[in-house]
Amino acid sequence: ALDRLQPTISISATTHSTACIETTIGLLVLLVILNSEISSIDKAAETMMSGPQLLSPQQQVPRSLWSLLCMTTLLLSSIQLTIATTSSDDNNGGNKKDLSAGKLRQLAETALMERKFTDAESYYRQAISVEPTNSANHYKLYNLHKRMRSYGDALGDITTACELLEKSEDGNSSGKNKNKTMEYKRIKAKLLVNLGRCEDAVSEYKSLNEVNEDATNCAHVTNAALSAYQQSDWSSAIQHFGNVLTNYATLGDTPDLLYMKSQAEYNVGDYYGTISDTGKILKSYPQHLEAYQLRGEAYFRLNEMDMAQKHFREGLKLDPEHGGCKEGHRLLKKVTKNDKRGDAAFEKGE
């Protein structure tokens, strides 16, 4: 029986701790089975050796001694295996902590090719912790976040990369660094345009002594939209906001512009337009309370009371004291109650 256990006991020290626990349990189960077999052998031996042929007490090995021997062997093997596995796990963990930034970037690239974006992000962040002043780490993280459509994070990454390169230029006047800084700044400016932050994009291009037509036009149209919105010129505001969102801020991560356009649509009675644009906001920002309120009010105007109630309640789940959602929900209940009374009176012929 002990020979049959040998392959189990000789498990490699690189086995994970989970396998070690399972092996220990298996060893204990086998011990119980072995103990039962020894008991059966003892009984058979007593039967066969009864009478004058019975062995002397010195020649007999008590069953308890066999059990003790087996238990000791198995437990020692299990303990040895546990120690080896723990040591291996510690060593592996230490190796992970000691990985170079280059190796971490390589692991991130591999994860990226396998579309394991969360793992890739983790590796890039570890690389940044090892080399926090290396702009390349932040630039690679920017590319990842942009691919994940996490544009706010991407903007933060490329901004940090630009700042690190500018700091490195203070002690290094090489043309290579300056060219890379200009490249990163252009990438940042283009992202700002795509996010509808056109004035910031214009400023970024100015820092490069450049003029970009898209950024300039976007800033002009955005200012026109904001001016019309402030003057309650809702039709003009809708037109200008639509221009910005269609031709410049194309990434869709523009909650402020979309919300103002939704309000303008609501004020001209385009409730379906309001529902459409607030839906885009909530898809990316599911905790946007004002969007829940405005969408609920649009559904209310369309007499879709169930949908209106749903949106007011969603807003109140996030903030039970939100004034707009509370008022909308209160008005909805009042109207619904009056409708029920009217229906009841109609059925009675009153």
Image: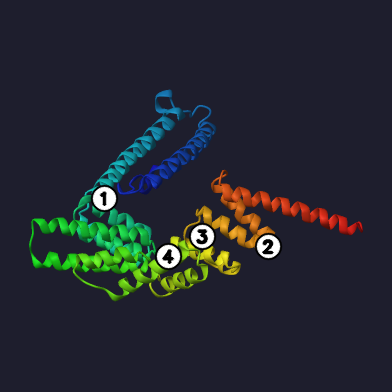
Circles 3 and 1: CB distance less than 8 Å?
A: no
Return the disc, 4 or 2, that comes first in the chain's sequence. 4
Task: Please name the amino acid that badge 2 sits on.
Answer: Glu
Q: For the residues marked 1 and 4, what is the alpha-carbon distance in whole angstroms?
A: 55 Å
Q: In the image, which is nearer the foreground, mark 3 or mark 2? A: 2
Horizontal side, residue 162 vs residue 171: left or right: right
Residue 224's place in the image compared with 133, above or below, is: below
Task: Please name the amino acid that badge 1 sits on.
Answer: Lys
Task: Please name the amino acid that badge 3 sits on.
Answer: Leu
User: How would you rate the neighbour count of disc 4 (Cα within 10 Å): few for under 14, some for 14-19, many for 20 or more?
Assistant: some
x, y percent for residue 312:
61, 53
Residue 240's place in the image compared with 82, above or below, is: below
Viewer-side residue, 156 vs 245: 245
x, y percent for residue 160:
25, 56
Horizontal side, residue 20 vs residue 159: left or right: right
Return the disc, 3 or 2, that comes first in the chain's sequence. 3
Return the disc, 3 or 1, that comes first in the chain's sequence. 1
Identify the residue shown where x is 41% and y is 42%: 21
Q: For the residues marked 4 and 2, what is the alpha-carbon distance in whole angstroms?
A: 33 Å
Q: For the residues marked 2 and 1, what is the alpha-carbon distance in whole angstroms?
A: 56 Å
Would you say residue 1 is visible in this rendering? Answer: no
Per the rendering, the mark at residue 96 is: 1
Horizontal side, residue 285 vs residue 332: left or right: left
x, y percent for residue 139:
25, 62
Mark 2, residue position: 304
Viewer-side residue, 8 vs 327: 327
Circles 2 and 1: CB distance less than 8 Å?
A: no
Q: In the image, which is nearer the foreground, mark 2 or mark 1? A: 2
Per the rendering, the mark at residue 282 is: 3
Mark 4, residue position: 227
x, y percent for residue 127:
24, 54
